[in-house]
Image (tube, rainbow, N blue to C red):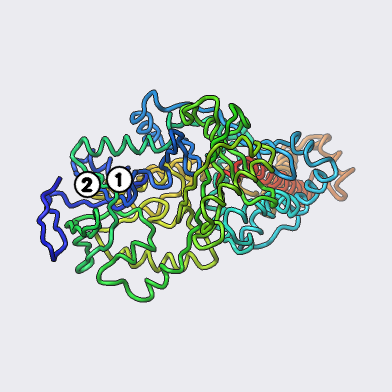
Amino acid sequence: MPDIISDQHQPKLAMSNESVVIIGGGPAGLSAAHECIKGGIKPIVLERADKVGGISRTETYKGYYFDIGGHRFYTKIEEIDRLWHEMLGDDFLKVRRMSRIYYQGRFFNYPLGFANALMNLGLVETSLILLSYLKAQVWSHPEEVNFEQWVCNRFGQRLYQTFFRTYTEKVWGTPCHKIQADWAAQRIKGLSLIVAVSNALFGGQKAKTLISEFDYPLRGPGMMWQRFQDVVGANGGEVRLNTDATGLSHENGRIVKVNYVDNGETVTIPADQVIASIPVTRLVALLDPKAPKHVLEAASNLSYRAFVLVGLIVDREDLFPDQWIYVHSPDVRVGRIQNLKNWSAAMVPDPKKTSVAMEYFCNEDDETWTMPDSELIDLASQELSKLGLADTDDIMDGFVIRQPKAYPVYDDAYKEHLMVVRDYLATFDNLQTVGRNGMHRYNNMDHSMLTGMLAARNLSGANHDLWEIGEQDEYLEADKKAKAQRLVPEKILTKTFARIDKLAFATAIGGVSGLFMFLATIWLVMKGGEMVGPTLRLLSQYFVGYSVTVRGAFVAFGYTFFCGFLFGWLFAYLRNLFLAFYVYSAKKKAELLSLRDFFDNL
């Protein structure tokens, strides 16, 4: 630990040769710290909670482990996948996925299956949904401004009302027409031409999160972040828990000091570089001198969605086979139910018992958030029973966890406010923001880690623009060369399936046909003989005025040009029509495949 100079009237000053400060000990912050260690830098991580992991931490209650939100470990970023396995080894389990939707008293397989949906909805309702879908394909919203329009264009109004509206509004607490369409476009990707065509040609690619199995730590995701903490600490870095950052002093466009509270005392440490994964709203408020008024106002207008987890211990060996259930029924408040035992048996100390996490999405000042713990436990117990998943008499115990600022909200003005904050923070040349809250992006765990890793590499001379990293980009390359290489196949496909210009193609076919007949006639005329072109003369039966003469050559050119032009135009028209339908259907196939894991992305 650095030496600390104590003074009763002044903040403590922690003297250290190392001056890289990372604020926030979640996946992004710890990944940045780990990358710093690899580069020979010994960072200091400040985490206000009593454990690392942020929203990906694991809480314990009487020996039961609770995952805050349910975190599957799945990525297409090989470096991150390799890092996960190196950290946990045999403690990294392979889990077979099972999840369902609860709606109108029935359980629907998720991802949705036609046969199961037909059986549960009935033939009439299923037919109406299909008709609504077809209508949406013909008369879609010309402009997708909000989330409701975005979904209706892809599913139809009836399926949107049946499945998507209720759950989405539970999660976000606002009508779907007030959620920006670009939120869905960010969360659900993979609909490029290359994906669409390869889907149709080669049997389809799975969407990024549509997986049948995933990796999971033996005792929850917090186990992963504890290992990161251990590695950082063992190699000269520090992870200071229960340390709440209270101020960032800056001069001439640089952060020079970071203040935090430790055991009631204020500590000041110098900072040459700062990486922050805390909410940008809080980060802006910590700056000293204060940020300009318009920046503070913009930051205050960025909002977040919170949730309350009610953990219940049930005196039953088995409740239901799913890892989680999406609850679409408006009759209950709970939005999602996790069965922790089905994630890993080690999450439950007694195999004859089961633990469930009832998740309630809310705002930090609403009734659910402020409800006393005892009332929340009663509510969760009653709703679990109402859904037919357990009897209240079987519920032995419960506890409550409140998670603030869990999900950045994409309201109709967030872009404008976020850009103001981004532009201001960019004026500090030694400050980088990473992760979900640090960038106000509703991203996945692997993306948060990647932003932290690249931010750390920037300290060693790299020049990664963290804001250019796409949340659901299948490749997530950091360098421009890889991105350029990735674009080549799509450009080739775009050229291969380009539309034929009807007029140009028809003119070309007509010209070639006419020229062929013209030259054929002239050649026979020049050849001469007793009977000039007896076979070709038969064309006079179809081409009025034609003869095997110089004059007839021009007549043949006119006729064959006209016929060739008609044939070429019709061929190009039908080819373009067929290709348009083919690409459209291929894209829809890929789009629906990507959207099958819709609720995983909410």
Q: Secondary structure at mark 1?
A: helix
Q: Quadrant of residue 60?
A: top left
The numbered mark at residue 43 is 2
Relative to 310, 224 lies left or right: left
Residue 235 visible in rendering: yes
Q: How would you rate the neighbour count of disc 2 (Cα within 10 Å): few for under 14, some for 14-19, many for 20 or more?
A: many
Q: Is residue 405 above or below residue 448?
A: below
Q: Which residue is mark 1?
A: 32
Q: How would you rate the neighbour count of disc 1 (Cα within 10 Å): few for under 14, some for 14-19, many for 20 or more?
A: many
Residue 513 visible in rendering: no
| Amino acid carrying mark 2 in the image | Pro
Q: Identify which residue, 527 or 464, lies in the foreground.
A: 464
Q: Compute the Cα span from label 1 to label 2.
A: 9 Å
Where the N terminus falls, by quadrant? top left
Q: Identify which residue, 48 or 393, lies in the foreground.
A: 393
Relative to 250, 451 lies left or right: right
| Amino acid carrying mark 1 in the image | Ala
Q: Are marks 1 and 2 in contact (CB under 8 Å)?
A: yes
Residue 134 rendering spot, x and y as whole percentages? 77, 49
Q: Is residue 290 above or below residue 489?
A: below
Q: Secondary structure at mark 2?
A: loop
Q: Is residue 440 above or below residue 486?
A: below
Residue 49 rendering spot, x and y as whole percentages? 34, 49
Q: Quadrant of residue 229?
A: top left
Give the mark, 1 or 2, whose residue is nearer the N terminus.
Answer: 1
